[in-house]
Image (tube, rainbow, N blue to C red):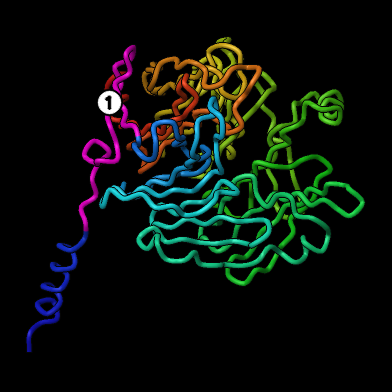
Amino acid sequence: MKPLSRILLPGLLLLAACQPRVKSPAESSLFKPFTDPESGVVSYVLQYGAPDDNRQSVYFTCKSMTEDGRFLLFWYTEGNEKKPGGPGPRHQMLADLATDQVYDLGLSTMTPFVETKEDYVVWGDRERGFFRVDFKDPKHEEKKLCDVPAELKALGEVRRLATHLTLTSDRKRAFLDTEVRTPEGKSRYIQGMLNLQDGSWEEWGETEWNCNHGQVNPVDDSIAMVAWEGCWDEAGQAYQKETGWYPRMWLVRKGSKELLPAKDINFASHEIWDDDGKGVSWCGHGYLTEDHCVYHADLATGEQQAWAKVPGARHNTCSPDNKYVVTDQAPETWWRGCKWRVAFYNRETGKYVWLYSTRDALMPQDNQSRLHPDPHPAFVMNGQYIVCTANNADGHMDLFVTPVAQLIEMTK
């Protein structure tokens, strides 16, 4: 009798030979190279649809490229904002760098969650419920996971399920920062966990203020981070006057919540977990002064530091090893569709390089974009690439994929 290994090996070799080879963005026909005229950084621009259409990176809290580099999720809208008739509705699209095909996964109603190791995406719709699509079978009908919790629907109109979806480490539950409008016209802001397998709902708490931007910790399912985004309003100002703290960032557990104060300049925006769940980074402010940059808090020690001294940082993510930071900056006045540029910061050397230098405004200030066109840079594929949006002055957006190795070399 032949050894089992001798029986299986030919079949395994045949299976491996049938697997399509994953191409890099430099090799794929879906991309064209672009060299920034000032920094010399080379990025790869996604080619899909008409030149006037918008190819846009997903919100920065979502890792939109799988770890093997094969699949890239992006947002797509037909039509130029500066021309009649555009833009159309936003679609979730999937680029396959093994086959150089692009698939339409349907309309996008929330920032989804991409499982980068197992190659699938999960998202929710406030009317239809939650769904999953496997990237290796993108033409197959979306798989229904569960309905919107009946407990929430019984309270009134569910207006938001999650600002941007995050799942627990076992991918079985989703953290929701919901908004429900009661029949009396009052908004209730309720947080909790939805079991995607059986649809059961576990309420964690409720806030009087608009609690959004929720993110469960990547490794600890018992804690999530949320934002009091509108804390510049009357209630937020009253809280700050009473406590002395700008109340943007909150850590929540079932039945409790606590403020995470930004101790240095007492302002925070666009917070995000480290990949290892041990800390949080955020942007200090959008002003172009030296102390308004990317900050970081270690949850175990409580220590807070300036991690990327790029004045005017707006959104940031850190590499998996926390050695590098990428952040976008509005070099002048901010508005939806203003001028933008994106910086890569090397924490080991204190140097940074512009991934792309200043690009002219997408839309004028008196006719702002409706597409949330901020760059939203994010590390993907285990930190090997950065994905971000690049605006064009003629009214459309492009998606850039930038290799990180060159940026490290430029900032030594």
Q: Indicate whether residue 198 is drawn in magenta.
A: no
Q: Is residue 96 left or right of residue 158?
A: left
- Residue 298 screen position, x and y as percent: 56, 35
Task: Residue at 78%, 64% (x, y): give it.
Answer: 151
Where, by quadrant of the figure, is residue 382 drawn?
top left
The residue range painted magenta reads 20-45
Q: Indicate whether residue 31 is drawn in magenta.
A: yes
- Residue 8 screen position, x and y as percent: 15, 76
As drawn, which residue projects farthest toward the bottom?
A: 1
Above/below status of 48 relative to 107? above
Task: Residue at 71%, 33% (x, y): give it.
Answer: 229
| Picture quarter with the C terminus | top left
Q: Is residue 252 left or right of residue 139?
A: right
- Residue 238 screen position, x and y as percent: 87, 27
Q: Amino acid at mark 1?
A: Gln
Task: Residue at 85%, 23% (x, y): give it.
Answer: 241
Q: Is residue 7 left or right of residue 117?
A: left
The answer to whether residue 412 of the structure is visible from this angle is no
Which one is in front, 157 or 77? Answer: 77
Where, by quadrant of the figure, is residue 23 drawn?
top left
Dominant secondary structure, magenta? loop
As drawn, which residue projects farthest toward the front?
A: 84
Instruction: Count all numbered tags in the image, as a single digit.
Output: 1
Above/below status of 134 relative to 114? below
| Picture quarter with the N terminus | bottom left
Q: Secondary structure at mark 1?
A: helix
- Residue 143 screen position, x and y as percent: 51, 67
The answer to whether residue 346 of the structure is visible from this angle is yes
Label 1: few (<14), some (14–19) or many (≥20) C-alpha neighbours in 10 Å: few
Q: Is residue 66 left or right of residue 158?
A: left
Q: Which residue is mark 1?
A: 406
As drawn, which residue projects farthest toward the right?
A: 184
